[in-house]
Image (tube, helix red, strand yellow):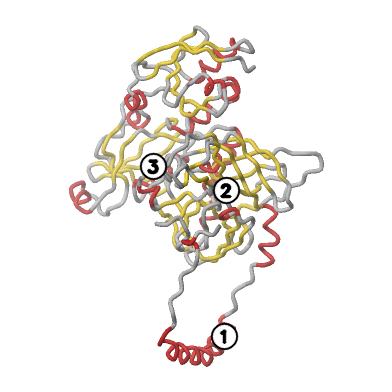
C-alpha cells in the first residue's frame, strides 16, 4: 500500500500555460548558446567509469539489535533533542504497525548502513552509530555475496568503526584508496556511493560546500559539508574525489523531515587514517593536557595585552594534570603546540588529542604579554572512547555480555553511586548472561568472584576464576548492593 505523503504534489497549470509556453520557447533559443559556452569552458566529467570501478569496494551493512518497544519515533540515544530534530545520523530502520496504527520499532531492531573495504583481507570502515550495540552484523557486497562481520574497534568520539568480514576460501576483496581530505577545496566535485533507504549501491554527486563544520556531535567535530545527495542508509559510506580516492565518511544530514535537502556532513578521511592503526588494536587513546579553555575575543585580548584575537585562553588548570605539573596557569593563552600555530580552542582540542600519551609536547603560551615556552609530558585523555575499547575485550563481552568503563568521580556523580571504585555497565548485549540475569546500563560491578573490583583490568582478572562454572558478582544499583550469579560461558 502506498503512503500518500510520499506521492508528489502537482499544481494545476491553469492560466499560466501561455507564459510557460513563451518561456519554454525562449529556453529553446537560449539553450544552444549555453551549451556552446559550456563546451568552451569544459564539459562536466562523466562519473560512470569511476562508479563502475569503485562500487565493488562499497558494502551494505545490516545489523540487528534487541531493543525495548516504544511508540516514539526518536532515534536511539537522541530522544527529542536538537540533534534528533535536525542532524539525522542516517541509518535506516524498518518499522511495524502498533496496535493503534502508530509506527513502532521492532523488538529486534534492524538497521541499514554503508561501509567501504580498506584492506584486501576484508577490513571495513563504517560509522560507529551503524554498528553500536549490534548483536549481529551482516555485510553484503555488490556481487551478492553475504558475510558476517565483527567489530574490531570503534571510536564513539569521531563516530568511526572498523569491522572484520568473515572470510571463506577463495574470497577476494576490492579495497579503496584513501585520499587526502586536507587538500580538498570548497567547490571540488565529490561522489557518494551508499545504501540510501536500502537502495543498494546508489551513486550521487555534488560539490564540497564547506570544510571544518562544527555541528555539536562531539568535541572533535571537523566535518566536510557537501550537497551530494545522501539519505538514511548512507551512514558509513564513502565520499570520493574525482581521482577515485576516499576523502570522507558520510555521517549526518541537516534535515527537518529526515530527507536530504542538500546539506550533508562527512568525516574527513584524514581523521580515519590517524585512527586506523589504533582501531586495528581495538583501543583508541588520545593526548591530554588537563586545561579548560575558551576563545579570545577583542575585550579579552585588550585586557591580556594581546596583539590579536587568536589562541586558546586557559580558564582552569586541572590539579595534578600534565599542564599543571609543567607550570601552565590560569590566564595563559596557548598559541602553539610543537610549533604548530593554535588559532582557537577547537584547534587546540584537535591538536592535543593527536599527541601521543607519554610523549613531550612543546607548548607556546603568552603570559603578561610575553611569549614563553613549556615542555609538557602528555597524559592520556580519560573518556568513553578508551574505556569502551577496554570493555570490548573478549573477557567482558564473551563471559558477561557487557560493555563497561571504570567508575570515575564524574560518572559516580551522574549515576548517584555510593561506591568509589568499580566498573559501570555502559551496555548489556542482547541474549547475554548479563541480560538474562537482569543487569542494566548504569549498574556498578563492585565485586566479582569474591574479589573487590576497582577497574576493568581487575574485573577481567577476576573473571578468569569463573571459567565454565559461572561468575558471582556484587552489583550496586541506585545505592543498593546485591549478588548476581551469571551462568558460565567459558
| Drawn side of residue 377 relative to residue 132, left or right | left
Q: Residue at x 32, y 42 (%)?
A: 365
Badge 3 crowding class, 10 Å Cα cut-off, few under 14, some 14 to 19, many 20 or more, is few
Q: The residue tagged with tag 1: helix, strand or loop?
A: helix
Instruction: For marks 3 and 2, give the one nearer the viewer.
Output: 3
Label 2 to label 1: alpha-carbon separation: 39 Å
Asked if labels 2 and 3 touch by Cβ distance under 8 angstroms, the answer is no
Q: Earlier in the sequence, mark 2 or mark 1?
A: 1
Q: The residue tagged with tag 3: helix, strand or loop?
A: loop
Q: The residue tagged with tag 2: helix, strand or loop?
A: strand
Label 1 to label 3: alpha-carbon separation: 50 Å
Report x, y in % for residue 303. Answer: 18, 48
Which residue is identified by label 3? 79
Q: Which mark is residue 135?
A: none
In the image, residue 165 above or below residue 203? above
Q: Residue at x 51, y 42 (%)?
A: 129
Pick whichever, 322 or 443, lies toward us: 443
| Drawn side of residue 87 relative to residue 231, left or right | left
Instruction: For marks 1 and 3, give the one nearer the viewer.
Output: 3
Asked if labels 1 and 2 touch by Cβ distance under 8 angstroms, the answer is no
Quarter-of-image position of residue 121 = top right
Which residue is identified by label 2? 113
Report x, y in % for residue 125. Answer: 60, 45
Which residue is identified by label 1? 35
> From where the camera sits, is residue 158 visible?
no
> From where the camera sits, is residue 118 visible?
yes
Q: Earlier in the sequence, mark 3 or mark 2?
A: 3
Pick whichever, 439 or 214, lies toward us: 439
Pick whichever, 359 or 184, lies toward us: 184
Label 3 to label 2: alpha-carbon separation: 20 Å
Amino acid at each position: 500500500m502506498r503512503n500518500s505523503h510520499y506521492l508528489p504534489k502537482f499544481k494545476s497549470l491553469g492560466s499560466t500555460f501561455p507564459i510557460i509556453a513563451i518561456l519554454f520557447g525562449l529556453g529553446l533559443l537560449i539553450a544552444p548558446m549555453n551549451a556552446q559556452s559550456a563546451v568552451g569552458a569544459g564539459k562536466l566529467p562523466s562519473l560512470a567509469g569511476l562508479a563502475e570501478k569503485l562500487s565493488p569496494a562499497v558494502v551494505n551493512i545490516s545489523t540487528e539489535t534487541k531493543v525495548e518497544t516504544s511508540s516514539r519515533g526518536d532515534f536511539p540515544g537522541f530522544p527529542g533533542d536538537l540533534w534528533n530534530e535536525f542532524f539525522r545520523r542516517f541509518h535506516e530502520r524498518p518499522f511495524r504497525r502498533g496496535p493503534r496504527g502508530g509506527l513502532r520499532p521492532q523488538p529486534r531492531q534492524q538497521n541499514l548502513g554503508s561501509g567501504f573495504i580498506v584492506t584486501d583481507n576484508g577490513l571495513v570502515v563504517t560509522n560507529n552509530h551503524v554498528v553500536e550495540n549490534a548483536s549481529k552484523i551482516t555485510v553484503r557486497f555488490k556481487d551478492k555475496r553475504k558475510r558476517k562481520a565483527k567489530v574490531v574497534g570503534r571510536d564513539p568520539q569521531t563516530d568511526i568503526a572498523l569491522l572484520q568480514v568473515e572470510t571463506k576460501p577463495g574470497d577476494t576483496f576490492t579495497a579503496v584508496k584513501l585520499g587526502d581530505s586536507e587538500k580538498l577545496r570548497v567547490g571540488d566535485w565529490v561522489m557518494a556511493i551508499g545504501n540510501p533507504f536500502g537502495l543498494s549501491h546508489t551513486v550521487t554527486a555534488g560539490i564540497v560546500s564547506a570544510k571544518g563544520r562544527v555541528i555539536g556531535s562531539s568535541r572533535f567535530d571537523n566535518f566536510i559539508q557537501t550537497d551530494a545527495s545522501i539519505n538514511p542508509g548512507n551512514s558509513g559510506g564513502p565520499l570520493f574525489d574525482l581521482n577515485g580516492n576516499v576523502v570522507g565518511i558520510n555521517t549526518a544530514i541537516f534535515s527537518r523531515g529526515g530527507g536530504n535537502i542538500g546539506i550533508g556532513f562527512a568525516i574527513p578521511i584524514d581523521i580515519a587514517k590517524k585512527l586506523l592503526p589504533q582501531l586495528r588494536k581495538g583501543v583508541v587513546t588520545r593526548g591530554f593536557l588537563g586545561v579548560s579553555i575558551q576563545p579570545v575575543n577583542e575585550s579579552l585580548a585588550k585586557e591580556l595585552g594581546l596583539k590579536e584575537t587568536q589562541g586558546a585562553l586557559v580558564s582552569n588548570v586541572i590539579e595534578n594534570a600534565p599542564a599543571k605539573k609543567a607550570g601552565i596557569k590560569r590566564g595563559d593563552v596557548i598559541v602553539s603546540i610543537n610549533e604548530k600555530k593554535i588559532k582557537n580552542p577547537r584547534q587546540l582540542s584537535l591538536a592535543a588529542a593527536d599527541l601521543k600519551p607519554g610523549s613531550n609536547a612543546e607548548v607556546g603560551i603568552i603570559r603578561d604579554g610575553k611569549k614563553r615556552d613549556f615542555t609538557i609530558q602528555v597524559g592520556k585523555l580519560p573518556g568513553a572512547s578508551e574505556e569502551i575499547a577496554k570493555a570490548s575485550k573478549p573477557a567482558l563481552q564473551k563471559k558477561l555480555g557487557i560493555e563497561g568503563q571504570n567508575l570515575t568521580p564524574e560518572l559516580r556523580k551522574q549515576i548517584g553511586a555510593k561506591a568509589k571504585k568499580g566498573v559501570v555497565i555502559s551496555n548489556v548485549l542482547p541474549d547475554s548472561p548479563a541480560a538474562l540475569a537482569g543487569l542494566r546500563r548504569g549498574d556498578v560491578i563492585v565485586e566479582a568472584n569474591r574479589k573487590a573490583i576497582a577497574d576493568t583490568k581487575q574485573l577481567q582478572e577476576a573473571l578468569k576464576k569463573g571459567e565454565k562454572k559461572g561468575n558471582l558478582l556484587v552489583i550496586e544499583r541506585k545505592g543498593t548492593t546485591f549478588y548476581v550469579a551469571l551462568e558460565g560461558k567459558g
